[in-house]
Amino acid sequence: MKHQQADAPETEIQDGRQSKGDRTRQALVETTARLLQEHGFAATGLNQIIRESGQPRGSLYFHFPGGKEELAAAAVTAGAAQVEAILQKGLDGAESPEAVLIQTSALFAEELISSNFSKGCPVSTVALEATKATPLLRRACADAYEAWLTLITGTFARLGLSQERAPRLARLTLSTIEGALLLAKATQDITPLNDVAADLSPLLKV
């Protein structure tokens, strides 16, 4: 085997099921996802990501040659997958669209409380900053919302909402929960999520 150069972390030998390069990439993505949730895109700097992830600058540019935007897009995608897992948990076992809303709102409330209100939606904060100047970031945010809407729409249809109502009410549900999450995080109070569950659920009757 040829000697690997110090600036090629991606070629490091496999250690168990995950290579050192994979662990480096994961550390960078996870740290960036956390910082984006806490500070947003503009206020999160590469030096801060490098410092808090404990990874060298060369590794960052090796895994993400596009720099901050490419790394942020990967972090948004990873965060979106976590939200999708929460959504799926809220959808599993629900016997009605109303139950989906109630269960999902409760799960997001639990996430906020367990993080001491430091975590909200990992996409919404960044989506507000995504522009034509950051196409990778904007695409990652759009893909996340589209995936969530597809999941909710499909569940609503399976639970009896018509083909016309299911996508419309999925958009209403997601928009309302997203707004409630932002308000709950800002006020350090889960009441907005409780209100959504109580007041919006009658609209979801089959």
Image (tube, rainbow, N blue to C red):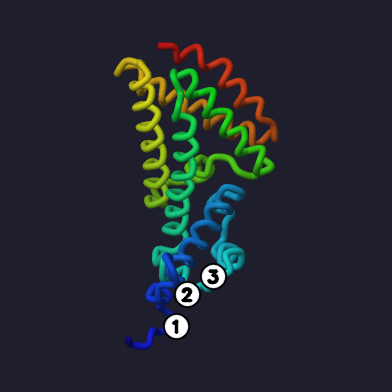
Which residue is label 3 attached to?
55
Q: Amino acid at mark 3?
A: Gln
Q: Amino acid at mark 1?
A: Ala
Q: CA distance from mark 2 to mark 3?
A: 8 Å
Residue plotted at (43% across, 66% down): 18
Left or right of 192 on screen, residue 69: left
Label 1: element kind: loop
Res. 13 in view: yes
Residue plotted at (60% across, 43% down): 119
Between 151 and 180, the one lying in front of the other is 151
Label 2 vs 1, first from the N-terminus: 1
Left or right of 102 on screen, residue 93: left
Q: Amino acid at mark 2?
A: Gly
Using the image, tell me which numbered label, if any, was put on residue 58: 2
Q: Is residue 28 above or below residue 196?
A: below
Residue plotted at (48% across, 40% down): 83
Q: Residues within 10 Å of mark 1 (few under 14, many from 20)?
A: few
Residue 54: image location, x then y, percent: 58, 69
Q: Is residue 57 above or below residue 76?
A: below
Nearer the viewer's eye, disc 2 or disc 3?
A: 3
Q: CA distance from mark 1 to mark 3?
A: 13 Å
Which residue is label 1 attached to?
6
Between 46 and 6, the one lying in front of the other is 6
Is the Cβ of the residue at disc 2 closer than 8 Å to that at disc 1?
A: yes
